Image (cartoon, grey):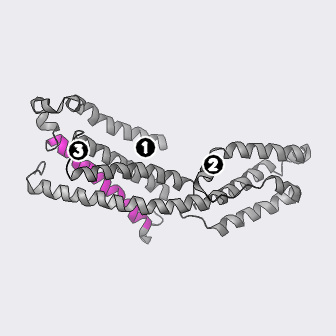
Amino acid sequence: MRFVYIGIWVLLALIPTIWMSDYILTPIMDRPYHPDYEWFKPSGLIGHGLGIIGSLNMIFGVSIYYLRKRLKLLQHVGRLSTWLRIHIFLCTLGPFYVLLHTTLIVNGIVSISFWSMVIVVLSGFFGRFLYNRIPKSDNGIFLSTSTIQQKISQLETKIIGHTNESVLKEIKLPQFELLLEALLFSLRIKTVKKQIIANVCQACGDEILQNKEINLRGLIDDFLQAQFTLSVRKPFQSYFNYWHVFHLPLAGLMFLIMFVHIVIAVLFGYTWIL
């Protein structure tokens, strides 16, 4: 599904880019003499239209995701992860259209909004990275420490029932406080899990491994995954909260200046079709 979103995004971004490429590549001083100048200039039908569509994309993308998270009426309408994908889709395509609207010329007070928009988009990718690594329920709610620990205890009991307590010493993962440590460990968790499972299975012997009623590898893998989510939960969620403090005010500044820009444009008669 992710590749479908990417494919549609690329298609929608390429169409106007290819259409405007000759104009954008024309030197700034020569653009007024370009045959499509009246269409592609920031106040032209196409150029201005892309600015409007891009702005609406961002407004709509932010609004629907915010409402989905806050309104109880929408709590069970689709998975939160799906709404997040739509939010990211619209809030990255929108800025790209705004970039085409500027025809790569950014100055004045609008430049503050533009560069705020760029930083918001880039920080959004980092926020998504952190968000994906925080354990969540199917409804997108962050799991509490007690919920994860309860799952670990249940898996621990099952593993002991099929092996012995000494095995648990071999499958304990470290806890992390710093984001960098959690990031580095998350990059090699698959290798770590594979090595631990191989060592435990070798120590347990063929009798347990060949017992079809006992999926020891699956139990250990689930146990390690639960431990991993607990070990990185604190640093990832802490920095995700810090990220919100940075991301939301910057997005607010971007929208504020964008609305000022729109009001000024309307007052000066740049009302597109109208």
The amino acid marked with disc number 1 is Tyr
Which amino acid lies under the numbered mark 2 shown in the image of this protein? Ser
Nearest the eye: 127 or 159: 127
Rendered image: mark on residue 5: 1
Q: Which mark is residue 106?
A: 3
Residue 142 location (% of width, % of height) = 56, 64
The tag earlier along the polypeptide, 1 or 2, is 1
Q: Which residue is mark 2?
A: 186
Nearer the viewer's eye, disc 1 or disc 2?
A: 2
Dot 1 or dot 3, earlier in sequence: 1
**Residue 251 magenta-drawn?**
no
Range drawn in magenta = 44-69
* Residue 16 vertical position relative to residue 50 in the rendered view, above or below: above
Q: Give the class, few, some or many, for how many residues have Cα within 10 Å of label 2's Cα (few <14, many ≥20).
A: some
Left or right: residue 73 compared with residue 130: left
Neighbourhood count class around disc 1 (C-alpha, 10 Å): few under 14, some 14–19, many 20 upward: some
Q: Secondary structure at mark 1?
A: helix
Tell which of 240 and 47 is nearer to you.
240
Q: Is residue 46 magenta?
A: yes
Q: Which is more N-terminal, label 2 or label 3? A: 3
Give the dominant element type of the magenta stretch: helix, strand or loop: helix
Q: Is residue 202 left or right of residue 145?
A: right
- The answer to whether residue 135 of the structure is visible from this angle is no
Callout 1–callout 3 Cβ contact below 8 Å: no
Return the x and y of residue 45 as percentages of the image width and height: 14, 42
Q: Nearer the viewer, residue 46 or 252?
A: 252
Quadrant assignment, res 74: bottom left
Type of amino acid at the residue the image marks with label 3: Val
**Cα distance between the residues tagged 1 and 3:** 29 Å
